[in-house]
Image (tube, grey):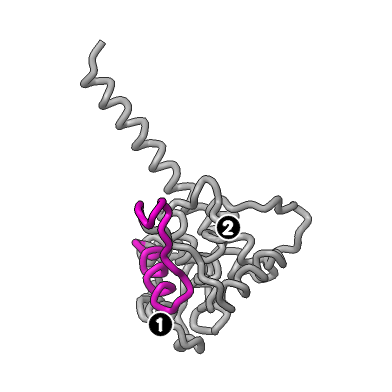
Amino acid sequence: MTTAKDLFIITMDPRPEPPVGQGDLSLALAGAELIDLLGAGAVTVDGDRIVPGGPPAADDPLLGDAAAQLTRQPPYERIDDWLWRRGRDLSAAYQAGLEKDGELTRTRSGRLSLGSDRVEPADTAGRRRAAARRDGREPVLTALASAVGIDDGRSDDEPGLGDEAVTTVVAAVHDAVMELEAVRQRRTIENASFANLWRGP
């Protein structure tokens, strides 16, 4: 299991209220992949740019796909550009991958098996590992979860991330999520103004 997969699982277990937005989660998953690639020695960070290295050691198809999408010619890609490009529909890709691996299961939410399917984590070693990282307040996972609005009362005196490159990536994820929220708010205001225009005085 990767940090991105652990992050996806803890956003559903237990299901937070309000639920995590798919766009927010996709950005955070792209950041989690980048952190795993840093840990595998597949990339380094030079300022705000991602410098590719060797292939990731982890045998994970989604992480391998992330490594294959790295920009390998200078000037290398900026971290924030990577988050938006790689993050497009990434939560859906992780859901499909985790369902295929048996880490997620579909259940019926209505009576007599009527109603829509709901996806939730299966009782697996992967789920228990993700929960242990969450409950142990592992700094990277906690910081990424916080970026998507999952905050279990994290205090300011908890230990930091301990790595400048990882800190840079986490900060970029927070900035991207805030930018996405600003876009949402702007669209809401524009849609309300448009509706008022048609409604008239």
Q: Is residue 72 visible?
A: no
**Distance from the alpha carbon under mark 2 to that under mark 1:** 26 Å
Where, by quadrant of the figure, is residue 137 drawn?
Answer: bottom right
Where, by quadrant of the figure, is residue 106 drawn?
Answer: bottom left
Q: Earlier in the sequence, mark 2 or mark 1?
A: 2
Q: Residue 138 location in percent, x, y?
A: 68, 68
- Determine which residue is flagged by label 2: 14
Q: Residue furthest right?
A: 157
Q: Residue 183 location in percent, x, y?
A: 39, 43
- Judge the density around disc 1: few (<14), some (14-19), many (≥20) Cα neighbours within 10 Å: few
Question: What span is in magenta?
Answer: 88-116
- Determine which residue is flagged by label 1: 61
Above or below residue 173? Residue 99 is below
- Judge the density around disc 2: few (<14), some (14-19), many (≥20) Cα neighbours within 10 Å: few
Above or below residue 90? Residue 189 is above
Q: Residue furthest left?
A: 198
Whether pointer 2 and pointer 1 mark residues with C-beta atoms closer than 8 Å, the reply is no
Q: Quadrant of the C terminus?
A: top left
The residue lying at 62 percent from left, 73 percent from top is 128
Q: Nearer the viewer, residue 111 or 88?
A: 111
Q: Residue 144 location in percent, x, y?
A: 57, 61
Q: Nearer the viewer, residue 134 or 186?
A: 134
Residue 19, numbered circle: none
